[in-house]
Amino acid sequence: MIAMLIITLGLAMREIRRHLMRSFLTVLGIIIGVGSVVTMVTLGNGTTAAVQQQISSLGANILQIRPGQGFGRGGGGAQPQPFDADDVAAIRQQVAGVVRVAPQVQSSGLAVRNAANWSTSIYGTTNDYLKAQSWSIDVGRVFTPQEEQAGKTVCLIGSTILRNLFRAESPVGQRIRIRDLSCEVIGTLKSRGSSFGPGDQDDVIIMPVKAVQRRITGNQKVSMILVSVDPAYNSDAVQASIKSLLRERRRLGPGKADDFNIFDTRQISETLQNTTKTLTALLGAVAAVSLLVGGIGIMNIMLVSITERTREIGIRLAIGALGREVLLQFLVEAVVLASLGGVLGLAIALGASALLSPMLQIPFLFNPTINAVAFLFSAGIGILFGYFPARRAARLNPIDALRHE
Amino acid sequence: MTAPLISLQGITKTFGEGLAAFQALRGIDLDIQPGDFVAIMGPSGSGKSTMMNILGCLDVPTSGTYLFKGHHVEQLTRDERALLRRRYLGFVFQGYNLLARTSALENVELPLLYRGEAKKVRQQAALAALRKVGLEDRAHHTPAELSGGQQQRVAIARAIVTEPEVLLADEPTGNLDTERSREIMQLLERFNRDAGITILMVTHEADMAAFARTTVKFRDGMIESMQIHKRLVDA
Ligand SMILES: Nc1ncnc2c1ncn2[C@@H]1O[C@H](COP(=O)(O)OP(=O)(O)O)[C@@H](O)[C@H]1O
Ligand SMILES: [Mg+2]
């Protein structure tokens, strides 16, 4: 049986080589189907990876708590009460499952150094914020506890600021002026590259929260509280306890709506994953249709080939080939043909995605699973659509087949 | 007399049904001894090919019994008959029926392929068979590169490569001139005499039938006469 299979494989290869052009056209459907689907899936994976990486730079499993009713629901009523340092401390002390809690005071202004100036965002916050957002220091250091306590005017600058105000000079120890305060640069932040969305994450100056409150915004307000959740805890439960704590602190009665909102960065990943699933399903449908077309192409050519080779089939049957041996021969031929189409499709997909990934600025991720599945699928198409013609060949009457012109 | 190799009793063959039914064989009784060389003659349409197809286990009779080496062929399945052909029979056709664009060697190897022989064994046996028909030097030629007579000799090599007990040839010289025909007949005569292969051959020509030991004449689906020219020497 094994020997028979090997011999049959040889026969199939010879038959395919004999009609190279026809064989190629026969499997064109499969080549295009496999090629396009695998290319799209590979590029899709690369895009997902790129986006996922940018999301994780936002910090994984981070809650952002802001005053107000959240997106789209605003309007009317009094200005929501802002948060302050006590809210931050309360969350840190009373909610289980939080790892870091950091205030963020957001402002903006013109940073000036000698003749150079740059308009930028100014964040007042703590070292915890840097950790939660996974910022790392390129040169220099983070804030000391005394600097945080006293609200010293020291600052960390993003790479965009570095580029625009310092060029090639070393910034650490130098001073820049923001509005009417002068602050010492103690370190630079490692670049994050362009973020998703229009924002440039490197265009930022970070100072101790008290310094910004006292010298820039002039009040005790905190515009946002950042909470990183312990992965061992359920994020929804942590959110619920923060919510009830804040409702209590803000004296919201049972009938009253929240006047603050909690945004979970995990939601972005989930949304993205759902989108990816939809996209994958769509690609699957495209694959099914193109492979169906490819399969019908194979069946068509196999039927033509069997008609052409009726006499050969008659000879084989006359000298003692069993029906199933003839069936095997044509089935193997169809499977080899379809698999070769699949391999060609995979090669094209490999070339196309390796070429397109850098152009789309996404990583090129070779996915062995999708390649294996696509290959097996094309072989399966060969079996499915080769079976009917092969069975027809096997059932030929040798006498009639020999008489065939 | 030894037991017959082939024994036919009351064989009929009807093609079609109802009004269109046509009886191509109408009651054939025939015994063939091992080692015989039988020429089947008769006018066109008298049922010779129909008879050969049944003898070659390619077809089954409508009624009657066909005993081949003790097997009731009329009761066998399609696959069982294929296995009988594979083991005991060799075929030579009027139109040669070689695989196109395939070398003489590979054509001759074909029956061994279905016997599951290894490549080496196949090649050696095929070369030996080609040598016996005098075409060793044409082993790598395709049918298109061979003359009619040469193609028929390749076909004979293919038929005898498995050392069959019976060789069936339906008008093997029908497409050849007299000289080529004689060469083919001499080959068949030699395989019959030296290798003891039983030969059943259909022919139109009395010249060719003269090579045989026995002549059976068909007319209208029945045996008209039977003549024995050369007795088989009992062992
Ligand atoms: N498959 C078939 N279907 C119908 N009629 C057939 C078939 N095969 C042979 N015949 C008829 O049977 C008769 C005998 O044919 P055949 O055995 O080929 O004759 P021969 O070989 O002696 O010339 C012919 O009349 C032929 O038309
Ligand atoms: Mg005939």
Image: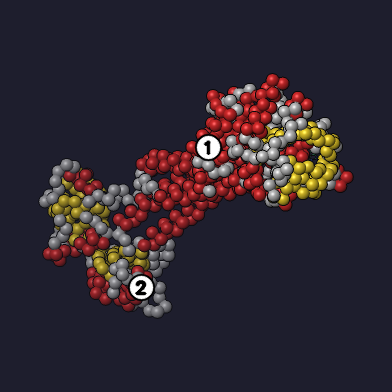
Q: Nearer the viewer, residue B15 or B4?
A: B4
Horizontal relation, residue A263 to residue A1: left or right: left
For label 1, the SS is helix
Dot 2 surroundings within 10 Å: few (below 14), some, or many (20 or more)? few
Relative image position of residue A210 (x, y in whole percent) = 19, 64
Residue found at x 18% / y 42%: A167
Amino acid carrying label 2: it is Ala
Please name the residue shown 36% across and 62% down the image: A266
- Ligand number 1: quarter of image: top right
Image x and y of residue A277, in percent:
46, 56
**Which residue is nearer to you in this view: B35 or A223?**
B35
Quadrant assignment for the N terminus of chain B: top right
Q: Nearer the viewer, residue B93 or B143?
A: B93
Secondary structure beneath dot 2 equals helix
Q: Position of residue B121 (x, y in %)?
A: 51, 38
Tags 1 and 2 on a common chain? no
The chain under label 1 reads B
Chain hosting mark 2: A
Q: In front of the other: label 1 or label 2?
A: 1
Q: What residue did someone put label 2 on?
A: A237
Please identify the quarter of the rendering in which residue A77 is found.
Answer: bottom left
Mark 1 residue crowding within 10 angstroms, few (<14) / some (14–19) / many (20+)? many
Amino acid beneath label 1: Arg
Q: CA distance from mark 1 to mark 2?
A: 77 Å
Evaluate whether residue B158 shows in this view.
yes
Q: Quadrant of residue B8?
A: top right
Q: Is residue A187 left or right of residue A288?
A: left
Q: Closest to the observer: A393 or A167?
A: A393
Q: Is residue B221 left or right of residue A34?
A: right
| Residue ID for mark 1 | B122
Seen in the picture, residue B59 relative to B204 is either above or below; the reply is: below
Which quadrant: the C terminus of chain B?
A: top right
